[in-house]
Image (cartoon, rainbow, N blue to C red):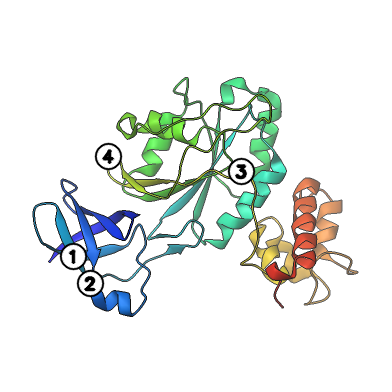
Amino acid sequence: MLPGVVVKAYNGYYYVRSDDEKTMVSCSLRGRFKKERFSLLVGDEVRYSLLGSEKGVIEEILPRRTMLSRPMVANVDQVILNFAAANPDINPVLVDRFLIIAELSELEIILCINKVDLADQAALAVLIERYSSIGYPVLSLSAKNGIGIEDLRARLQDRITVFAGPSGTGKSTLLNAIEPGLSLATGQVSEKIGRGRHTTRFAELMPLAQGGYVVDTPGFSLTEFVDIDERGLMYCFRDLVPWIPQCRFNSCIHYKEPQCAVKEAVREGKIHPERYESYLAVLTELKENKKGFRL
C-alpha cells in the first residue's frame, strides 16, 4: 500500500496526492468504511492500493492529529485569518467574531491584514497593537505590491494551513502571490455592496512548492456560533482569560454580576472596551439563540 494525503473530495471520489508529491490518484473508498459511515475528510492521511496508473482504492485511514469543523478539514496545523485593511475597510467586530471560531479549533492562529498600502497607517498601527498585545501574530501584507509575501511564505512551509476570512479581502490574490501556479479565481469588490464575490466553492488542499498545503475556504461574511456555550465563550477571548479566576463568583459570565474582575479590568483599561463589547454582543446572541446555547 502507498501513503498519501486526500487533497480533494468530489462526487464520491477522493483525490490522493502521494508522499513523493509527484502523482495524483483518484480513489474510491473501500466498502467497509462506507458500512461504518466513516466520513473521510480533505487532509486525511491514507494508504491506498493502485488499480491502474491514475486510479486506486483507499485501504487504510490513519489517525487524525487535528480536525477543523468549519470547514471540515483534517490534520490542519494553523489557521490564517485574512482581512483587508481597506476596500473593504477592516471591521474589528468581524475580526473578533472570526477569532472566536478560530479559537474553537485549538490551532495556532495568525492574523493577516492585506492591502496595507491602501490604509491609514496610523489607524492600522493602533489596530495591529490591539491584537498583537493579546498574543496574536499579525502580518501586514500587500499582495499587489509584494509587501510581506516572503514572511507569509516562510510561515506556510511544511504545514497545512487554512485560510479563512470575509469575502473580498484578497485571499485568492494573496495565495496566487505566494504560489503563482495555483491560479486561483479572484473576484472584484462590488462598489454597490462593498463586498467581494465568492470565488472559492469547496475546501481543497493545494500543494506549495516549498512544502506544505494551503486550504482556501469558501468566502463568507457572517459567523454563526452553534458549537459554543456561554461558559466556553469567555475562553475564546485571550485577553479575558487571565482575569476570570479573580472574579468573586465561579459562575460569573462577566455580564451583570457584581465584583467581576473582567469588568474591572475593562474599566482600568487592561482589556480593550471594544473587545469586551464584542464579547457581550456574542454572549447576548447565544442567549437569544437557544440552538446555539447549551448549559
Along the horizontal axis of the image, is 179 left or right of 23? Answer: right
The label shown at residue 57 is 1
When asked about the image quadrant of residue 234, the answer is: bottom right
Q: Identify the residue at horizontal 79%, vertical 68% (top origin).
A: 253
Q: Which residue is mark 3?
A: 132
Question: Could you tell me how far apart the alpha carbons at marks 2 and 3 are, in whole angstroms?
Answer: 47 Å
Viewer can see residue 238: yes
Q: Label 3's element?
A: helix
Q: Identify the residue at horizontal 67%, vertical 49% (top origin).
A: 96
Amino acid type at circle 1 is Val
When asked about the image quadrant of residue 244, the answer is: bottom right
Q: Give the mark toward the camera: 4 or 1.
A: 1
User: Which one is earlier in the sequence, the residue at label 4 or at label 3?
Assistant: 3
Q: Give the mark toward the camera: 3 or 1.
A: 1
Q: Identify the residue at horizontal 74%, vertical 49% (top origin).
A: 275
Q: Residues within 10 Å of mark 1 (few under 14, many from 20)?
A: many
User: Which one is earlier in the sequence, the residue at label 2 or at label 3?
Assistant: 2
- Image quarter in which the C terminus is found: bottom right
Q: Residues within 10 Å of mark 2 (few under 14, many from 20)?
A: some
Question: Could you tell me how far apart the alpha carbons at marks 1 and 2 are, in whole angstroms?
Answer: 6 Å
* Coordinates of residue 43 in the picture (x, y in percent): 34, 58
Amino acid type at circle 3 is Ser
Q: Which residue is mark 4?
A: 210
Q: Give the mark toward the camera: 2 or 3.
A: 2
Along the horizontal axis of the image, is 234 left or right of 168? Answer: right
Q: Which residue is mark 2?
A: 30
Work out which residue is located at the far left of the displayed protein and give it. Answer: 52
Query: Of 263 and 90, which appears nearest the observer?
Result: 90
Amino acid type at circle 2 is Arg
Given contact means CB atoms under 8 Å apart, are the residues at marks 1 and 2 in contact? yes
Query: Of 40 and 106, which appears nearest the observer?
Result: 40
